[in-house]
Image: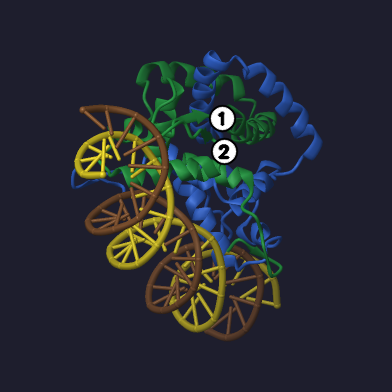
Chain colours: A green, B blue, C brown, D yellow
Amino acid sequence: MGIVGGVAVVEDELSLVFSALADPTRRAILERLAHGDATVNQLAEPFAMTQQAVSKHLKVLERARLISRTRTAQSRPCVLDTAHLDVAAGWIARHRQIWSDRHDRLEEHLAALKVKQRRDGGTR
Amino acid sequence: MGIVGGVAVVEDELSLVFSALADPTRRAILERLAHGDATVNQLAEPFAMTQQAVSKHLKVLERARLISRTRTAQSRPCVLDTAHLDVAAGWIARHRQIWSDRHDRLEEHLAALKVKQRRDGGTR
DNA sequence: GCGCAGTACAACCATTTGGTTGTGCAAACT
DNA sequence: AGTTTGCACAACCAAATGGTTGTACTGCGC
């Protein structure tokens, strides 16, 4: 696992980003941060879990470069890093394009999505 | 973990899709399928792992609804299911938009991505 | 009917993941 | 100076993940 030809492979960017996004808690954290920077405790508050658990999630997001953190006094506010989400968006866009070349359904799906998003709003 | 208020939560669509995409092998499989349907053995061939391992990956992709499979005689060809990739694309697009409202860097990044994609072509 | 090709299931194993509790430490409050 | 606040590190645990081998099933070629 993570080993090719006997040499450890640095976990690639894309895998880090996608697996960071694969958790509902972390997606919720990102949504929250989208509306403004926040401290760890502020982020932890809505969740039924300990502050330490949230800290771990933040570390995952940090490793995926989806957030960055500044050490401001005794609190460590979190800031979004948009660029690395684009890594994931790029992969998907590229592949959706290949498929759309075959199925020619890209625009149709995009339109349907736009409507659905407006309807159910939240993460899930 | 996957438990809220003592009740098991059905793993949400988004998490399934993102975690399915979080593995390089599975992304490679999807890329391969983008160029045409294939059998399990055809898919397994380029990888340094057993057919059984690939079968497991296919089951993950199937659960995320990224592929579907037909039982044609004794081989089970895999077919892409574009719609569910759009679930993921939709989430990202929605959030990138929120961020771009704050940072106003959306178009810039999209343009940069398009160039980069052309340059390095492959998955990673 | 027999063997083989193609695939899946089961049991097993190591590592990772997501959570816990308990503790430590640095900055701010009083 | 002493306490509280905000956060992280460590040890631990259960479950999920990604792989293995071994085996079994199913349909085709002969």
Q: Is residue B67 visible?
A: no
Q: Residues within 10 Å of mark 2 (few under 14, many from 20)?
A: some
Q: Disc 1 sits on a residue from what chain?
A: A
Question: What residue appears at the point 78 percent right and 39 percent down from the top-left corner?
Answer: B120
Q: Which mark is residue A65?
A: 2
- Mark 2 lies on a secondary structure that is loop
Residue count near mark 1 (Cα–Cα under 10 Å), binned few <14, some 14–19, many ≥20: some
The residue under label 1 is A81
**Vertical relation: C22 (above or below) B21:** below
Q: Which residue is at a point 43% across and 26% down the rendered structure image?
A: A33
Give how far across and how far down residue B38 sits, in percent: 65, 52
Residue A54 vertical position relative to residue B56 in the rendered view, above or below? above
Task: Assign a secondary structure to mark 1.
Answer: loop
Q: Which mark is residue A100?
A: none
C23 versus A37 height, above or below? below
Relative to residue B31, is residue C20 drawn left or right?
A: left
The first of marks 2 and 1 along the sequence is: 2
**Label 2 is found on which chain of the structure?**
A
For residue A86, say whether it is visible.
yes
Q: CA distance from mark 2 to mark 1?
A: 7 Å
**In front of the other: D9 or B92:** D9
Quarter location, residue A118 = top left
A102 lies left or right of C9:
right
Q: Quadrant of residue D25?
A: bottom left
Tell me the residue at 62%/18% (across/down): B106
Q: Amino acid at mark 2?
A: Arg
Q: At label 1, which amino acid type do we have?
A: Asp
Residue B73 in percent (x, y) is at 56, 58
Find out whether the residues at labels 2 and 1 contact each other: C-beta distance under 8 Å: yes
Across and down, in percent, residue B124 comes to 70, 45
